[in-house]
Image (cartoon, coloured by chain):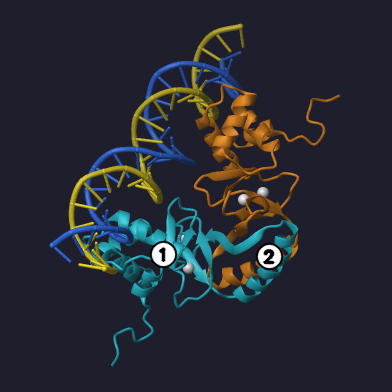
Chain colours: A cyan, B orange, C yellow, D blue
DNA sequence: CTTTTTATTGAAAATCATTTTCACTAAATG
DNA sequence: CATTTAGTGAAAATGATTTTCAATAAAAAG
């Protein structure tokens, strides 16, 4: 029956190879952690979970892997207002979404409601702004800040 | 002719007093710097400019003043993607605006074009999202990321 | 104008997430 | 096997921000 890679699983080995990189045990652990959570984890939190999968992984490798994956466009680095970065897979089942950010516990809540309207408006703005300010727009950020249900 | 404070100048002494704080030479220097620039300066950049006004000001005082003013709602702390925070007066002649952020030089460019449409959409989203997610929304952030005219 | 109270200060040390260094290992290639 | 190059963990370095602490200045009280 062919050679693996059924069930829509991603060919990470191939993706890395395309960037002149190798798929290693450490990187696999980091990716497994990212695939196995709905949260927006910090490097440190990813490190702890990755260690449960492979106790040999070092924090340095977690940072390096996250940076590599960001460069490859496979991971998004998020700012929760906390001083540490948080990460999520770019291509997850959630699709394009924005975040509600709790200023008390720094939790980031996904939402994709009304996002089509938001994106449509942003695209119109982008077109006009990029012309007016001679500014090449590559991406946008929308976040709402406040207090989450847990925190009130 | 009364006692000062004509010409729409703000009564900083009174503002601080209202928060149980004192108006000092260091704080005045920081505020003067913020009032005198159109840029979005880092703490360090504010420190350097403040020193030209009052050579006795310390970097610590700059940080403390910026935090105090943020608590008072008089200063906005901004994230340029750079690792250091940038600051602007909350009540400046610019009014409510958003930013284009250059990912190459980290410059933040003000814009208020089309902002009414943006804000209107955001307010509608806010209403629905806060109900659906039981999330109390206090503020929002919109930024566009890309390459500024200087950098291309 | 004193005295007392309390906020503010600068310098130096501490914090803490992230990055860099370095000597070593593992993978790929021939 | 021999060579080349990517990847590694531990420890050290970095750099923005915060904290500590003893000294000072402003406000309030007398
Ligand atoms: Mn998300
Ligand atoms: Mn601005
Ligand atoms: Zn919360
Ligand atoms: Zn630029």
Q: Residue at x 66, y 49 (%)?
A: B150
Question: Looking at the image, do the residues carrying marks 1 and 2 touch, with CB atoms under 8 Å apart?
Answer: no
Residue B147 in percent (x, y) is at 62, 56
Front-lying residue, A145 or B151: B151
Disc 2 sits on a residue from what chain? Answer: A
Front-lying residue, B65 or B109: B109
Callout 1: helix, strand or loop? Answer: helix
Q: Residue at x 21, y 60 (%)?
A: A56
Q: Earlier in the sequence, mark 1 or mark 2?
A: 1
Disc 1 sits on a residue from what chain? Answer: A
- Asked which quadrant contains residue A65, the reply is bottom left
Residue A96 in percent (x, y) is at 53, 73
Q: Do the dots labelled 1 and 2 sit on one chain?
A: yes
Residue B140 in percent (x, y) is at 61, 59
Residue B122 in percent (x, y) is at 66, 66
**Residue B141 in view (yes/no):** no
Disc 1 crowd, CA 10 A, few/some/many (<14, 14-19, 20+) = many
How far, Cα to Cα, is label 1 from label 2? 27 Å
Q: Is residue A44 left or right of residue B98?
A: left
Front-lying residue, D21 or A56: A56
Disc 2 crowd, CA 10 A, few/some/many (<14, 14-19, 20+) = many
Per the image, the residue denoted by label 2 is: A126
Callout 2: helix, strand or loop? Answer: helix
């Amino acid at each position: 029956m062919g050679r693996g890679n059924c069930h829509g699983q991603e060919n990470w080995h191939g993706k890395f190879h395309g960037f002149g990189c190798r798929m290693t045990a450490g990187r696999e652990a980091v990716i497994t952690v990212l695939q196995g959570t709905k949260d927006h984890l910090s490097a440190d939190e990813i490190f702890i979970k990755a260690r449960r999968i492979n106790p040999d992984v070092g924090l340095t490798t977690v940072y390096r892997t996250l940076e590599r994956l960001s460069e490859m466009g496979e991971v998004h680095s998020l700012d929760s207002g906390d001083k540490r970065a948080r990460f999520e897979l770019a291509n997850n089942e959630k699709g394009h979404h924005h975040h509600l950010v709790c200023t008390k516990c720094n939790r980031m809540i996904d939402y994709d409601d009304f996002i089509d309207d938001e994106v449509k408006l942003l695209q119109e703005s982008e077109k006009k702004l990029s012309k007016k300010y001679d500014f090449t727009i590559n991406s946008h950020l929308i976040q709402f800040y406040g207090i989450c249900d847990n925190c009130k």
